[in-house]
Amino acid sequence: MTNLPDEMYSVATVREIDRAAIEDAGIPGYTLMTRAGSAAVSEARGRYPEAKRWQVLCGAGNNAGDGYVVARLLASEGIVVSVITLVDPESLEGDAATAHRDFAAEGGVANPWSGELDASADLIVDAILGSGLTRDVAGKFAAAVAAINGHPGVILSLDIPTGLHGDAGAVLGCAVRADMTVTFVACKTGLFLDQGPDRCGEIVLADLGIARECSANAVAEFRRMNSQRTRTLLPKRRRAAHKGDFGHVLVIGGGAGMPGAVRLCAEAALRSGAGRVSVATDPGHASIIVATCPELMAHAIRNAGDLEPLLEKASVIALGPGLGRSEWAATLVAALTDDERPSVWDADALNWLAESPTKAANRVITPHPGEAGTLLDSTSADVQGDRRAALAKLHERYGGVVVLKGAGSLVTSAAGVPWLCTSGNPGMAAAGMGDVLTGIVAALIAQGLSVEEAAVAGVEIHARAGDRAARSGERGLLASDLLAEIRGVIN
């Protein structure tokens, strides 16, 4: 996804860009459809040159039209191609009907769906239902989706996998699991949210040669994080720099019997460039933490009063890893509620916050969907059903900067267009990953970034460190594996 643009749009906005290209820029709709089919053929043949036998499944609307264009172009290039139709081509209208007529005029034949695919096909093209789908896939369409997902060949989806919601990324009953999706005009948000990344495979954008003027008034739903922006936020250090230039992170957590989370968070802060990192933790953990990472300064905290001298030296607070729900934890949270230092709240700190909601402009909260549901008096399912809306509600209720973690983590923005992370991998669905993220974000704030800059850069650094750590495999990835990778990413 490294070559994709940063802007992601709703389906309605992409349609408006398409309309502007046709009506304002004077590009015929069928010309755009032909460009789409040509781009899909070019991209797929370039990646899968060994595919000599193709089968195209055409459904309804312009998605079917794209499929007929693909089939016609493949045949003209000498590729063995067969076409199955789930909707009578005679019922098609507009450009889709034109695409079928041109396909038929060159000898193409579309056979009605019989319940089976060509078992010998090397590549299956999904041109059944496009991004306008809003209801569950059922009947013969569901049967075709199941057949595609069970086929051993490469699966190519045109514009969006059939069954995937174009805005939310939810699976509508069932959905094609593609190896590659060639999407047209602009990136739709559903490709990147919820089940989108799991269903799309490699995503390629074909902008169809539409001039940028056609999207000048289009408002993006999300902006994609990228490594280039992260690099600009973290310039090369001066030769005369010293540790005092890079802030002092105070990590507060590690209730009785839970030293691991606070230790991960604190070392992540060090690895991310904080000048100094102190840990305020249960008295039973301080010596253990220092023994395993001597660069950390661990302090035994018996009550809120023990925090005061540490707070005086801290420039940013990371609260929550391993904190727990004890009376000890409650007193520490109460002591920090009105603290004006920038802070990052995660894990049990979020559960305490949900019980006594407050707003803070200089605070970053980093809930996963379950914690977000608790913070909103809702459920994880509700949050996942509309992640953008949940992000906005969290910001409205708690202020500051919100990081809504998950596949495609989201970050609020003062500019109004949230950030979305497309890096990361399923191996990162493991214990302790959030603790590492908290440490990274806190360290970036300590080095002078604003809370929003730190949240955005921190999420991207965390995800890219996870991708580096997963090079030898995603299954079995540990949060501590990221610690060795952070330095390479952040530099």
Image (cartoon, grey):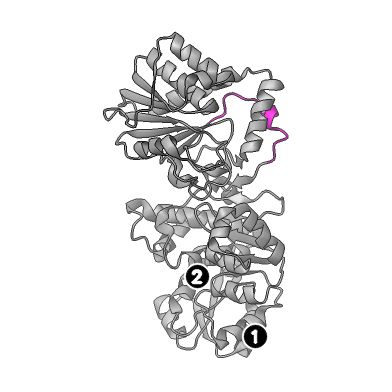
> Which residue is under mark 1?
308
Label 2 sits on what residue type?
Cys
Label 1 sits on what residue type?
Glu
Residue 212 within the segment the image draws in magenta: yes
Point out residue 168 in the picture as x, y percentages from the top left corner: 56, 47
Tell me the CA gap for discs 1 and 2: 21 Å
Magenta-drawn stretch, dominant element (helix, strand or loop)? loop
Q: How many numbered badges does the structure rendering display?
A: 2
Confirm or deny contact between disc 1 and disc 2 (CB under 8 A): no
Task: Give the image quarter of residue 395.
Answer: bottom right
Q: Residues within 10 Å of mark 1 (few under 14, many from 20)?
A: few
Taking the spot 55% from the left edge, 36% from the top edge, the residue there is 131
State whether residue 236 appears in this view: no
* Residue furthest front as drawn: 139
Q: Residues within 10 Å of mark 2 (few under 14, many from 20)?
A: many
Taking the spot 50% from the left edge, 40% from the top edge, the residue there is 2
Q: Locate residue 16 relative to residue 270 in the image: left or right.
A: right
Task: Give the image quarter of residue 214.
Answer: top right
Q: Dot 1: what SS?
A: helix
Nearer-the-camera pick, 133 or 78: 133
Taking the spot 57% from the left edge, 19% from the top edge, the residue there is 95
> Any mark on residue 265, and which?
2
Q: Which residues are magenta?
A: 206-219
202 shown above or below 20: below
